[in-house]
Amino acid sequence: MDAQALEIRNLTYRMFVELGRAPAADETAVAAGLSRSDLDTVWAELHDAHALVLNPATCEIRMANPFSAVPTAYRVRAAERSWYANC
């Protein structure tokens, strides 16, 4: 994983925490100062490295362990906030 991919991974996780949901690709691209196409390329690299999981139909985040972008029966709780988690 190169420096840019690590930076985008950290940004993606930070946005997940701050937003309380998975960040959309468009808003992550803006926050990163990248085009949507460039973000898609980095997210695909992170997906291939198992750093996050993308929805193949939309190229949006489905999972960034321990966070889930889709509702589950499991919750992560920290600092009086909560997020969906994977099993």
Image (cartoon, rainbow, N blue to C red):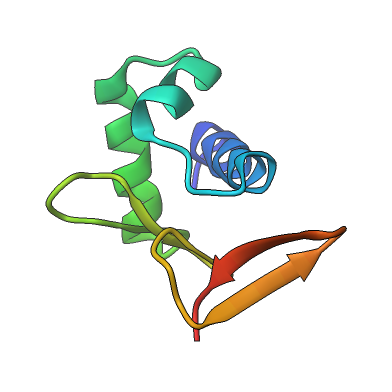
**Whether residue 32 is situated above or below residue 66 in the rendered picture:** above
Depth order, front residue of 48/86: 86
Image quadrant where residue 47 sits: bottom left
Q: Residue furthest bottom?
A: 87
Image position, residue 8 (x, y; %): 53, 35
Q: Residue at x 62, y 75 (%)?
A: 75
Q: Residue furthest left?
A: 57
**Whether residue 53 is situated above or below residue 7 in the rendered picture:** below
Image position, residue 36 (x, y; %): 29, 21
Q: Residue at x 61, y 40 (%)?
A: 19
Image position, residue 86 (x, y; %): 50, 78
Q: Position of 78 compared to 87: left or right?
A: right
Image position, residue 3 (x, y; %): 57, 35
Q: Position of 76 compared to 67: left or right?
A: right
All told, the count of numbered labels is 0
Image quadrant where residue 37 sits: top left
Image quadrant where residue 52 sits: bottom left
Q: Position of 26 compared to 68: left or right?
A: left
Depth order, front residue of 85/7: 85
Q: Residue at x 46, y 16 (%)?
A: 30
Q: Residue at x 41, y 16 (%)?
A: 34
Depth order, front residue of 78/36: 78
